[in-house]
Image (cartoon, rainbow, N blue to C red):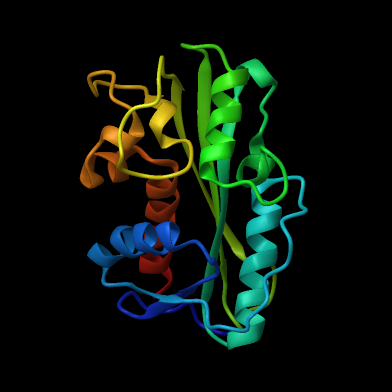
Amino acid sequence: MAEAPRVGRSLVLATRNPHKLREFGRLLSPAGIGVMALPDGVELPPEVGDTFAANAIAKARAGAAATGLVTVADDSGIEAEALGGRPGVRSARYAGPGAGDRENLIKLICEVPVGSRLRYVCALALAIPGRAGEPVVFCGRCEGRMAGAAAGSRGFGYDPVFVPDGDWGGRTMAQLGDAEKDSISHRGRAVAGLVAWLSRES
């Protein structure tokens, strides 16, 4: 059975999203773990799973198989209580095929009442070439509510309308500094689980 990568090595991140590449690089750097972009030409499977974990596992497997390197992949999104948990796994294409962050955000603003509950969810899968069994999955959540209006220029996706629970002065995720966001974000919490596992397995 292949050994887990030691802390201090690099991981391939199976994504084409530059925002995620920067965020994961920032989250993993304190543990001495580098992040490599997915090489050009590597094709990732479509996100057709019913759960965040299923999509993350499929992408991590594909990245590891194509590169022969330890690969991590995430699938993440937002769940609105007022919409019965939607858009969920369809968060990246909520406004339709080819929709971008702006179109998805506008659709959420139109459909979700101000002050109603929101949840960010992240599933992070780690695939190690040659290791038997399923990729290891780490999950993170961040609870919050719908803002009265979009605010802030930091972050991406639905961050301008997501007001996290806690003593943050009513600011949205897009108004928080990097350190503030990383301490409570769904990705930050999932990465903390990954780093702890790697530390134990190394």
Q: Is residue 130 visible?
A: no
Q: Which residue is depicted at the point 65% across and 52% down? A: 53
Give percent across and percent down for residue 109: 54, 22
Quadrant in which the N terminus is drawn: bottom right
Can residue 136 be seen from the camera position used here?
A: yes
Q: Residue furthest bottom?
A: 68
At a point 55% along the width and 29% down the height, the residue shown is 106
Counting from the top left corner in percent of width and height, residue 123 is at: 56, 50
User: Is 77 situated left or right of 197 in this image?
Assistant: right
- Relative to 183, residue 81 above or below: above
Left or right: residue 160 versus residue 139 is left
| Residue at 40%, 19% in the rendered image | 149
Give residue 23's position: percent from left, percent from top: 36, 57
- Answer above or below: position of 121 versus 84: below
Residue at x-position 50% and y-position 61% = 17
Considering depth in this image, is 100 or 75 the residue closer to the camera?
100
Q: State the image coordinates of residue 174 (x, y, percent, origin top left).
A: 33, 36
From the viewer's perspective, is residue 147 above or below residue 13? Answer: above
Compared with residue 85, is residue 82 higher up or lower down, i.e. above or below? above
